[in-house]
Image (cartoon, rainbow, N blue to C red):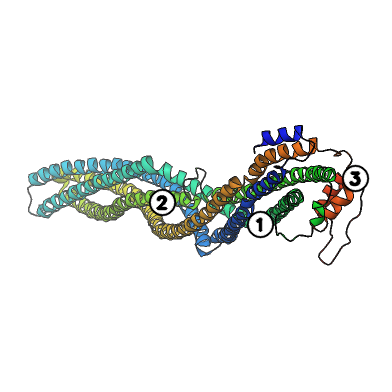
Amino acid sequence: MDVRQWSDQWAQASQIPAGTAAALRALAAGLADAAAPIEGSFTAVGGALGEALTVMDGVAEDFRCLSALLENADGVNAVTALTRARHDTLELAANAQRMLGFLSDLDQSSVGLEHLLATLSRIIGEITALATNAKVQAAQIRTTSVDFSVFNQEIDRLHGLANSTTQQASDRLTALRAAIATAHQTANQFHADNARDLDAIGARLKASLQELSARRATARDSTRKFSARVSEISARTAQCIMGLQAGDLTRQRLEHIGHALDLLAAMLEPRAGAATDMDWLAALSEERKAALLAAVCDLQAQQYARTTHDFTAQIQGLRGNLQALARDAEAIATDARRLFLNEGGDRSFVGAVAADVDRATQLLNSYRQADERIREQIILVSDGFAAMKRGVTAINSIDADMRIMGLNTTFKCARLGEAGKALGVVAQELRACSRRTEEASRAIAEAIGGATAQASSLNDHSARDHESAAELTACMADSMAALGGLEGEQKRALTGLTARCGKAATLLTKTAQSLTLEQRLDAFGTDLAERLSTIIAIAPHHASVDSVREDVLRMLEGKYTMASERIIHDLFADGDAGPTAQADDVGDVDFF
């Protein structure tokens, strides 16, 4: 018999329709079917929650390990190495600029030296002309008392030696200027290609160092704050566990409703051979049965509505707490990524620092290669100035010999009188040239001394920079090793943490989405309310519940053992507390 046929019978009959007992039993069975998934669903939720919490147990330790990595030996070594690398890189960049100044000064000194050598060369040219003239004059003197053959030989030797020595000094200077130009060009090329980058990378290393230090401080602070997040997670977990009790409570309340419907069905149509303490119900008059039927159905309709209302609120609360736990898991992963990844989020921030160090290392290698080429030229310049100094010493010796030779020649020509007058004039000119040669040589020697000091200073600076670059290269290697180790450990730890958080978040989210039991109960509640409302609306004497109060109490006595059922008693009693059972050793007992 369907609901419409059954309702028609209720409308047409003064007696309770025959199909009412079967309808009540069908409702009780349907209620059991609707409530059946509750236990399994909540068991599954509890299992998923337990699994998620097991996963989350390792997250806190992962986070602490991640933070602690910045404080371990690799983290400390990275900070130390970066501090030194930043200082040395900036210093090398400044030195590269100063090197250009040193080489420019040295080039200017070589230009001045070239002018002095040109002056000396002109004087030597004059000596050559005087030597030729002296030989001509000496050949015209006809006397046996004075021999000018030694003079002729010596004048040839001295001016030849002066020529060759001066030419040699000039050639050396040309080679030196070429070496200086090569060194200057190499330094200029490095400066154009890398020096600005080296300066910039020094600034980036400074920024990386500051970021690394800031991240270490933030990690320490985040570790302290993490305990507060753990407390929040614990509180939500406790709320979830409390929410799981809603399944048992709801199932018990639905079982009470179903049992009450079964009792009504047994009152209307007792089962043969069924032993029950409710035989008195069958003995009631039809009118009293109808009133009791309506009153109890009214109570169960209200109880079902209250139960589903409470269950929906509890399900929503449990779902909200599960979703909040999922968000907590995602937030932990987000915090960890923000703390330990670069701004782009595509790699560890330690890796970004390592990239700066690697770039600085490449530039440093370029610097060292350029420095090697510059040093080779500087050594050539230093050796060349030393050789030029020796050449100037030789010119001074030639000057001395030339002055002595000129003085002797003058004395000889004086004894010859008018015959030696012309040669004597030439000898005087040779002595005058010798003095000029001496002055030029002295100026050249001073210039060479100044240039040699510049070259020596440049060599010393270059040697120190070369050593600093070598030490910095080793420091960079240590820094890269430390950063590489740190990045690898952080990557493994962060991957593990985000995987745990992702797994927990996915599990909790799916579990929350699967909690749709209230929809099932709501759907069944529509049918239940329709059927029960038919009975409640048509049954006679329904408005006078006082007439069946004792019957209701007797029928349901001992069937409701939850304090929450007081609300049913209040609804039934219309604010009258009525009789209730006393508390026993199980807890506060209420029949309704």
Front one among 135 and 291: 291
Residue 388 in picture, x, y percent from top left: 27, 52
Element type at mark 3: helix
10 Å crowding of disc 1: few (<14), some (14-19), many (20+): some
Front residue of this view, candidates 563 and 285 = 285
Could you tell me which secondary element the residue under label 2 belongs to? helix
Q: Earlier in the sequence, mark 2 or mark 1?
A: 1
Alpha carbons under labels 2 and 3: distance apart: 94 Å
Mark 3 burial class by Cα count in 10 Å: few <14, some 14-19, many 20+: some
Q: Is residue 406 visible?
A: yes
- Circle 1: element type: helix
Q: Amino acid at mark 1?
A: Val
Dividing the picture into quadrants, the one containing residue 45 is bottom right
Front: mark 2 or 1: 1
Q: Which mark is residue 230?
A: 1
Q: Which residue is nearer to you in this view: 432 or 19? A: 19
Looking at the image, how many numbered discs can be counted on the residues?
Answer: 3
Query: Mark 2 and mark 1: span between their CA atoms?
Result: 39 Å
Disc 2 + disc 1, Cβ < 8 Å = no
Single out the mark in the foreground, 1 or 3.
3
Task: Say whether disc 2 or disc 3 marks the residue closer to the N-terminus.
Answer: 2
Q: Could you tell me which quadrant the N terminus lies in?
A: top right
Q: In this figure, which residue is indicated by the disc labeled 2?
A: 358
